[in-house]
Amino acid sequence: MRLDRVWLIYRADSPIALREARKCAADLESLGAKVSLAMSGLSADPFPGLLASEPELPDLAVVLGGDGTVLGAARHLAVLNVPILCFNVGGHLGFLTHEASLLGGQELWQRLLDDRFAMERRMMLQAMINRRPDLNCPVGTSSGRDQSNGGDSPEVHWALNDLYLRPYRDEIAPTCTLELEIDGEVVDQIRGDGLILATPTGSTGYAMATGGPILHPGIDAIIVSPICPMSLSSRPVVVPPRSRLVIWPLGDGSRQVKLWKDGASGTVLEPGECCVIQRAPHHALMVQLEQRPSYYRTLAYKLHWAGSLVDSAPSPN
């Protein structure tokens, strides 16, 4: 891997992440790399500025923070095929990150220069918004950047973890009715707190909290999981990755719903508009440093599985 140009993205509210970012910048600059530092957080989105001001895309984006910081980077950089190397510095759960102990000194960067790493491709989701007053919700393709709506360009949103729709207004009861269409067939009208569409990467997030299944990230599929449905018949389902899902908010004009992407604000939809969700045409490229990575070991550690085995001797098995 070339390291001529590197973006260092660090968690905005973490002094530890800033300190580590400065150390990494010094090490990379000593190797001749051009480094750009930027902080990322709820009120600090560095990517529009970087993409507008930097003359070239980076060879690598190094993310220092938690899963939220990584998700923000993936939403902007995956479509540009920029590899992401992430470390849990100042974060919490850290499902998507390497441990901070792997940071330090020139050895890490020399390892990348020597191509001693693996590249993991993670499926992403794409949501396209149709606001035209007709019943035909068309699907286009987009290879541009995440956008709200400019001119005739489609309104596109991307997510690595999940896309979900929930009621928008606070002054009414937090429920909505969403009609779900899969591959041209109306499957359900879900009444409740909303609907989650998740990737296998996002299966251990919001979708898991609503009772959805955990999927290995090596599987390409889409999890459809209702949020607190008012009917026992509305259950989580897993659909093939090529599925085309269309979600229609139902009700009067006050029943607006909001689309969220990886927990970040997306857009508001009114009854009569629809959201088309499919597998994105691009993947998030995640640099993997572990020689023998184990998804199941990560699950057991992060979700505290088999706690009795950790504190005592394991069984003969």
Image (cartoon, helix red, strand yellow):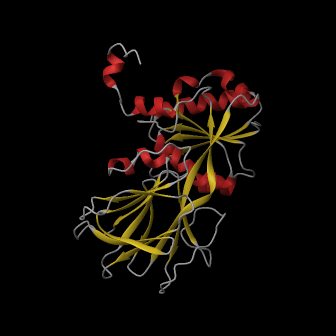
Asked whether residue 159 appears in the rendered view, the answer is yes
Reply above or below: 109 against 153.
above
Reply above or below: 230 against 219.
below
Q: Looking at the picture, tell me which residue is in the foreground, 104 or 20.
A: 104
Q: Work out which quarter of the rendered image holds the C terminus and state it.
A: top left
Q: Where does the image place residue 98, in percent across and percent down from the top left?
A: 54, 31
Q: Is 238 displayed left or right of 37 in the figure?
A: left
Q: Is 18 displayed left or right of 143 in the figure?
A: left
Reply above or below: 173 against 288.
below
Asked whether residue 41 appears in the rendered view, the answer is no
Q: Looking at the picture, tell me which residue is in the foreground, 152 or 21.
A: 152
Q: Residue furthest top?
A: 313
Q: Work out which quarter of the rendered image holds the N terminus and state it.
A: top right
Q: How many marks?
A: 0
Q: Quadrant of residue 226?
A: bottom left
Q: Where does the image place residue 70, in percent across and percent down from the top left?
A: 53, 44
Q: Residue furthest bottom?
A: 134
Q: Quadrant of residue 51?
A: bottom right
**Residue sitting at x 62%, y 79%:** 152
**Residue sitting at x 73%, y 25%:** 110
Q: Looking at the picture, tell me which residue is in the foreground, 66 or 317.
A: 317
Q: Where does the image place residue 67, in percent across and percent down from the top left?
A: 47, 42
Q: Where does the image place residue 211, in percent across and percent down from the top left?
A: 32, 50
**Residue sitting at x 62%, y 30%:** 289
